[in-house]
Amino acid sequence: MTTEARAPSTTVGARVLRFFKVLGPGLITGAADDDPSGISTYSVAGAATGFSMLWLTWISTPMMAVIQGMCARISMVTGRGLAEVIRKRLPLSLAYPLAIIVIVANTFNLGADIGGMAAAAHLVVPLPVDAWVFFFGVALLASQAWLSYGMIARIFKWLTLALFAYVVTAFVVHPAWLQVLVQFAIPKVHLDSGWLSTMVGVLGTTITPYLFFWQSSLMVEEEKEAGRTTVAARRGTDRQSVKDMHTDVNTGMIYSNLVAFFIIVTTAATLGAHGRHDIGTAQEAAEALRPLAGNFASLLFTLGMVGTGMLAVPVLAGSSAYVAAQTFKFREGLGESPARAPRFYGIIAAGIVIGIAMNLLHVNAIRALFWSAILNGVAAVPLIAVIVWLASNKNVMGEWRSSLVARAWGWATFALMGAAAVGMFYFMARGS
């Protein structure tokens, strides 16, 4: 987000106020990462592998921050969304398949998230699940079509507070904190297909493709909101703007991984510790929590699903629309009206309608939440390579190309996710 450079604040209160003012796309993106799919994946990880994957939350934090920061900086420097930059810099034979893969994965994930929200809401208010599916789908579609970008951004920032439910729940269940800290601090890898599949799922739902495009596109939307409506007006940045962006992105990624940490702690300390290793979704986790941790913990876990879904579903639909618009060259933007950008809003509507249909036709999308995270983990690998290459390319970024340290973290992220995916397939083939 480009802002005018300002003199450093002189008081603690002014610095705190400025900190909250610069929070925006990065915070929203980080919170949207903990969608119902992510919550289900972290729940499965805690129930099936105990505390053994907690170390992934600290190692993935700088990896997420670096990749998302690269996506944001690419848009700040070029004035364009990530998908448009990819279309201009890569052969169309590569750009088109990448775009289609992301859109298909987003749509499937969106349907699963709507199903997750509906199932969670049903646990609190026992209306038919199909009724909740229809209600959430229509409400989310209407909000994106009728609200301005500025209003949507403000609502999204408040919805990020829903994730605190999982922080509170972790303290309610009273885990063995010493064991938690040991497993968090000391990385251990288990060489079997089940553990590695779960690891790929956790990484895939944490460092996930739709966030790359959403982060980038929100940076452009912020510029448009500030009156810079042309590419030429948006092109370029300054040190204060880059510093503010990194503050925003780093805060969002820390918040995202902190929530993941507490979800794993909650389910490991309750379900995993009591032999409930076969949890398939977050809804099952919420139900199973009730006899082990009480109604309050179960209720918090459930309501968190609904709150995060209200944030994540529009992000998934919007991400698909931005990717399609930037790749296939038609008018885009949540700041535009449906009349001015009919194909952009058509993609949003199609994604949500397909998501509703998946659930009304009882496609077992909820069960597949975990596997969709694994798919995202595999699909993210080539995209990360493209992002690091673009952010490191002097012809694209000029003086704002990534530093040597950032490039090292970027390629390390590529290597870790690639190795985890290869290891998963290897041990699956061996049947171990």
Image (spheres, rainbow, N blue to C red):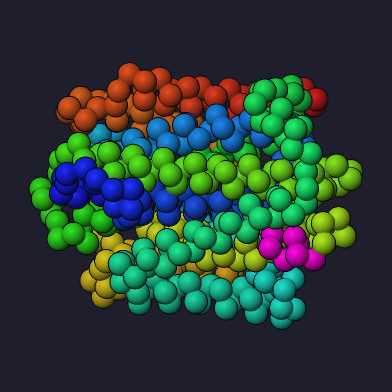
Does the stretch in magenta take in 413?
Answer: no
Q: Name the side, left or right, on which 91 lies relative to 293.
A: left
Kindly tell me whether residue 104 is visible in this rendering: no
Query: Is 359 located above or below residue 253 in the figure?
Result: below
Q: Indicate yes or no whether the magenta region holds residue 300.
A: yes
Q: Residue at x 33, y 39 (%)?
A: 246
Tell me the quadrant of the picture where the C terminus can be found.
top right
Q: Which residue appears at 74% of the width and 24% of the height? A: 190
Which residue is rendered at x = 19% and y = 50% of the image? Answer: 3
Who is closer to the viewer here, 27 or 171?
Answer: 171
The part of the image, by quadrant, that contains residue 75 is top left
Front residue of 75/273: it is: 273
Whether residue 135 sits left or right of residue 54 in the image: it is: left
Q: Which residues are magenta?
A: 295-301
Residue 1 position, x and y percent, is: 25, 49
Image coordinates for residue 156, horizontal then vertical, percent: 43, 63
Q: How many marks?
A: 0
Across and down, in percent, residue 216 comes to 32, 47
Q: Is residue 209 left or right of residue 84?
A: right
**As drawn, 325 above or below 306:** above
Q: Position of residue 223 (x, y in %)?
A: 21, 54
Tell me if residue 244 comes above or below residue 305 in the rendering: above
In this rendering, the answer to whether 297 lies above or below 4 is below
| Chief secondary structure of the magenta portion | helix
**Residue 145 vs residue 254: left or right?**
left
Residue 384 visible in the snapshot: yes
Foreground residue, 182 or 95? 182
Direction left: furthest residue: 232
